[in-house]
Image (cartoon, coloured by chain):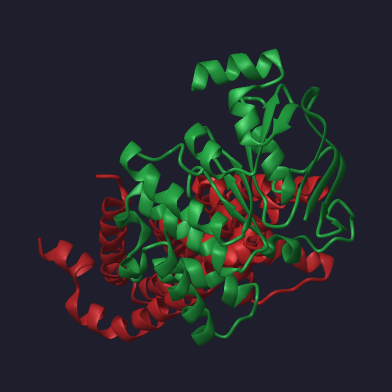
Chain colours: A green, B red
Amino acid sequence: MIQVKNLQKKFKDIEVLNGLNFGVSSGEVVVIIGPSGSGKSTTLRCLNRLEEPSGGHIYIEGKDIMDPKANLNKMRTNLGMVFQSFNVFPNMKVIDNVTIGLIQVKKTNKLEAIKIAEEMLIKVGMIEKRDSYPDSLSGGQMQRVAIARALAMQPKIMLFDEPTSALDPEMVDGVLNIMKKLASEGMTMVIVTHEMGFARDVADRVIFMDNGFIVEEGPPSQMFSSPQHERTKSFLEKVL
Amino acid sequence: MDELIHAFFNWPILKESMPLLIQGLWVTIKLSFFSIVFGIILGLILAVLRTLNVKLLNFFIVIYLDFMRAMPLLVLLVFVYYALPYLGITLKPYPAGILTFTMISSAYVAEIFRSGIEATPKGQMEAARSIGMNYFQAMRFIILPQALKIVIPPLTNNSINVLKDTSLASVIALPELLKQAQQIQAWKANPTPLIGATLLYLLLLIPLVKLANKLEKRMSPK
């Protein structure tokens, strides 16, 4: 589903990503963990080119999205993205947040778009806020609307960039439960998170990053109980 | 006292000059309307083009903006009307006025829109692009509606300034309100028409100033 080859990212002279190689297969849930500044979010943001990689190749369903001729906008409809800061559109109602992509990008007709959007809002438990504006919602509710907005585009892959880091503790479970449900439905997911419990329960594979390198990867059972590298061990000791 | 009333508040002269003053007011309104609307359109285009961050394009846009903001309005107006004919470009007073006011206003409007666009969180553009919108769709549906809310008060103030500045068009023989008043004054040898023009300006502008105040209050954080 996703193949990353020698992915590099430099900010000026600083190497943020040092030639990463990894893959994600269809239906797999991959969780990327690591200390702040290790390049996790940058990696994720390179996958839909919100961040412009400095080198390497990223294949989504076999197509190299680094190809200058690649249709970025079309590619992005296949990759749903959920942000740490939600980024719901404050200038429109909840329902319009979810339909706007369908109507403007996919050119779905309005009635059909509303039908899909309502389905997604039901899925994330936000249908009763259908006609509210985002400024009346809590952080957890906004994040659920953001998830519905991404899902409405019917993406093949969902990217989550620290989706619960900006939430009040009591809001975290609601969002994680939606993500669990998505995982159980077979959605391909790449998740950057500090929620180790969630990683252990839901991930098929955990990638540990440090300093722009992938230090180690493996199934959560192995990563959390018997990590191979010193760096992984000391990180996990601190966060668990 | 009688002399004062005769000079400044001469009722018969005021009554007589009113139809001409109203004609002038109408010219002022039309002139302002087109200058404000064209200024907003041009300013918005410049502001959006500038966000594309194309170096060469921005170089020219910045030159235009700096030039227009540094240029005294009256100087540009006189230049467009009295100097351009020597280059073979002869404009009638109306287009010369609208062109000048539009150019100067567009520079201020561009800066106003730029600050509004910059005040919109970066994540909004990213979220819009992440669902597959192209740059201009994201601008149109997500960024500009949010920026517009922020820029309405300064935009209103700028529009008031344009309206007031149109009185400068009297120097290029454009029959707007001030020009009309001056002509009647010369003709009647009495300054009462100027008082009439002043009243009409205030009647037009005070509600707009009130509106600007209200908008500013509504937009300011509680």
Q: How many marks?
A: 0
Please tell me which residue is depicted at 52% across the width and 47% down the height of the picture: B115
Query: Between residues B109 and A127, which one lies in front from this camera angle?
Result: A127
Please tell me which residue is depicted at 83% across the width and 71% down the height of the picture: B88
Q: Is residue A73 left or right of residue A55?
A: left
- Spot occupied by residue A213 in the image (x, y as percentages of width and height): 76, 26
Q: Is residue B154 visible?
A: no
- Spot occupied by residue A195 in the image (x, y as percentages of width and height): 49, 35
Q: Is residue A95 above or below residue B16?
A: above
Q: Residue furthest left?
A: B1
Q: Is residue B44 above or below residue A19?
A: below
- Spot occupied by residue B20 in the image (x, y as percentages of width and height): 37, 83
Query: Between residues A139 and B55, which one lies in front from this camera angle?
Result: A139
Q: Is residue A2 left or right of residue B219?
A: right
Q: Quadrant of residue A16?
A: top right
Q: Quadrant of the C terminus of chain B?
A: top left
Query: Between residues B150 and A158, which one lies in front from this camera angle?
Result: A158
Please tell me which residue is depicted at 67% across the width and 15% down the height of the picture: A231
Query: Between residues A23 and B186, which one lies in front from this camera angle?
Result: A23
Q: Is residue B65 left or right of residue B83?
A: left
Q: Is residue B218 left or right of residue A69?
A: left
Q: Quadrant of the N terminus of chain B?
A: bottom left
Q: Is residue A6 visible?
A: yes
- Spot occupied by residue B143 in the image (x, y as percentages of width and height): 54, 58
